[in-house]
Image: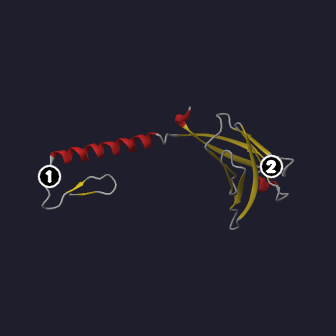
Amino acid sequence: MQQTSHFQLSQWEGEDRILRENFNSDNAKVDAALADHAAALAGCGNCRLWATTYVGTDECGPSHPNHLTFPNGMPLAALVFSYCGEIMVLVPNATSTTYHTYMDTTYGYNRMQVSWSGNTVSWYSDQTQTPAYQMNSPSPYYVLAFYQADAE
């Protein structure tokens, strides 16, 4: 009798004797695999969102960093974006991120320095003197933070 490669389930050939013990053993293996799968899915949790907006101060550089405090603790990740196609992804404890813009048919990017302290993140760009490339033009920006809902 052959067995499958992943769970060693019975694979009978024409002359093999079929025994109830083989079926019972296979059923126990399938049941255990399904239980493990269900436990893994339960650990994935649900996502909770938090959103806010801010208007940039029209400043940039290391002496004028942006600050954002998340009232519900540190998120799994956060998106900062504008109506004109700018986007930045913030990941906890990451020390840098990249600003991207897709305005009209042009594409641009800029590296940002990021620091985290508790549930507050700060970022700045030292590569340009353009507040837009630091997500800090005097226009609205939108923030969407992702939290694991069952981690509360």
Can you tell which mark lies on residue 5?
A: none
Spatial separation of the CA atoms under disc 2 and disc 1: 76 Å
- Furthest-right residue in this view: 63
Q: Residue at x 52, y 35 (%)?
A: 150
* Image position of 56 with respect to 3: above or below: above
User: Looking at the picture, how far across and down is residue 7, in whole percent?
Assistant: 32, 51
Label 1, on which residue?
18
Q: Nearer the viewer, residue 18 or 53?
A: 18
Q: Residue at x 47, y 40 (%)?
A: 43
User: Looking at the picture, how far across and down is residue 114, in whole percent?
Assistant: 75, 48
- Residue type of the residue flagged with mark 1: Ile
Instruction: Identify the secondary structure beneath mark 1.
Output: loop
Q: Residue at x 18, y 45 (%)?
A: 21
User: Looking at the picture, how far across and down is residue 86, in whole percent?
Assistant: 70, 56
- Residue type of the residue flagged with mark 2: Pro
Residue 147: image quadrant is top right
Please indicate whether residue 21 sits to the left or right of residue 143 in the image: left
Disc number lying in front (2 or 1)? 1
Count of marks, rendered view = 2
Label 2, on which residue?
138
* Image position of 83 with respect to 143: above or below: below
Dot 2 or dot 1, earlier in sequence: 1
Q: Quadrant of the C terminus?
A: top right
Residue 16: image quadrant is bottom left
Q: Quadrant of the N terminus?
A: bottom left
Q: Are marks 2 and 1 in contact (CB under 8 Å)?
A: no
